[in-house]
Amino acid sequence: MRAGASIRDVTVPELLGHPSVHDALFARVLVLDDGTNSVAILCLDMVWPSFPEIRERIKQQLGISLTLVNCNHTHSDARGAHDDKWRETVGQSIYEMVEEAYANRVPVTLHAGRASVQLGDNRYGRDFTQEVIPWVNVLAVRTRDDNPLAILFEHAAHPVVTLECGALSADYPGYAIARINEEFGDEVVPMFAQGCGGTVNAEPVGFTVESGWHENAEKAGGQLGEAVITAIHDSVEIEADTLEIRSKTVTLPLRVPSMKQWEKHVEHLRDQHPNDETELNALQSIKGIIERGEQPGLTYCINAVMLGSEWVLVTMAGDVFGEYELFVNAYAPFDHDMTFGYTNSREGEDDHEHYILTDKAIALSIRKPHRAQKSCRDALRVIKASTHENVRLPYAVGIEAIIHDGIKSLWAE
């Protein structure tokens, strides 16, 4: 097994119209290569961008089998200010980073570990879910002389401690990385990946000036960093030296209203927004779907990177509920597992997958919509269908089982 790692500062505040920077935003990459298969794992201090054009360029020009782009989901990355110039500049920097890591591959050993840690709490209460992820998963990459090259670690909690601070910040993941560098030296590349933290907020959430944004983020990051250090010291070497890389695309069903529900929606729209032709046209498309008995859906890709029966990384897109990471941990036939959400998500504020709910949460939203809207807020956004142009509908009950089956199919062979 050979590996390379690299890092780039991708803050560029001058392109964000956001000159206030508390701490820099970074892109980091780990490339693993067994001589036949290779994977590039990118960790970005950003909310959503997954740079599909850069992933394709990496595949075509560097020959890397699969590129996984995980966003740590910091809410202090100047969301909404990522224009074309920013994207071009940052995308080129990311490509050069991967190119550098690939060119500088060296023989390595891999070590997997886990330690207990919990930074946040479930923000949706007992109606929808109470689950949290009480661990950090670690993959340590060491050179043949046993020096750490890179440390990939995953925990599930929204980086919202510096929310509303008014400055760019990587939030608690940046402080965790600083603690790891303090322990192992600046030559190592620590990489934080966001797990299935769709319903979990790192505490305390930084809504007010009194929140002590960065002091609290440093405390949380220090706690996570210490857990990573513990996991590394307790880690075990992975003997398998062959990468198995698999992907599965499933279609998640979207919920089609009854004709009676559709008529009520049209009546409400004409009463409240009679000149909204765009929405009226979209509703006409939905009427056709109802009449034809069609099932709109969203195409959804799941990836797995495996090392024998010793280690598996499962990645999913969107704000994934914690139950999915717990599912992988419970059923994966591997000694060690790691699960990412927020990975290779679709592009655009209106286009990405949003929250990947459980069937229980979706069913509750149907039975008790008022309670659902109150406790789950924007988790029930409508989704832009892959199968029908200009159609937006919420997820239907059944997506959880489809995703579970998709995940299991990746390791079934």
Image: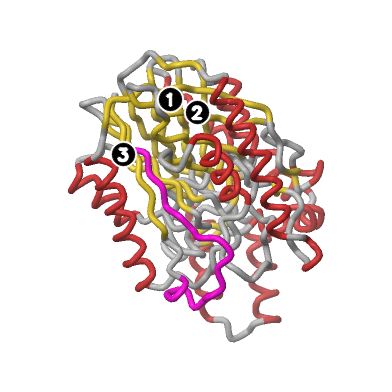
Q: Looking at the image, which is closer to me, 326 or 175? A: 175
Q: Looking at the rendered structure, which numbered label has been put on residue 409?
A: 1
Q: Looking at the rendered structure, which numbered label has been put on residue 359?
A: none
Identify the image quadrant of residue 62: top left
Dots 3 and 2: beta carbons under 8 Å? Answer: no
Q: Looking at the image, which is closer to me, 201 or 16? A: 16
- For the record, the magenta segment spans 13-30
Residue carrying label 2 = 405
Q: Looking at the image, which is closer to me, 11 or 390? A: 11
Dots 2 and 1: beta carbons under 8 Å? Answer: yes
Is any atom of residue 220 visible in this view? yes
Cα distance between the residues tagged 3 and 1: 18 Å
Identify the image quadrant of residue 127: top right
Q: Looking at the image, which is closer to me, 102 or 207? A: 102
Cα distance between the residues tagged 3 and 2: 22 Å
Identify the amino acid type marked 3.
Leu
Report crowding for label 3: few under 14, some 14 to 19, many 20 or more residues within 10 A (C-alpha): many
> Dot 3 lies on which element?
strand
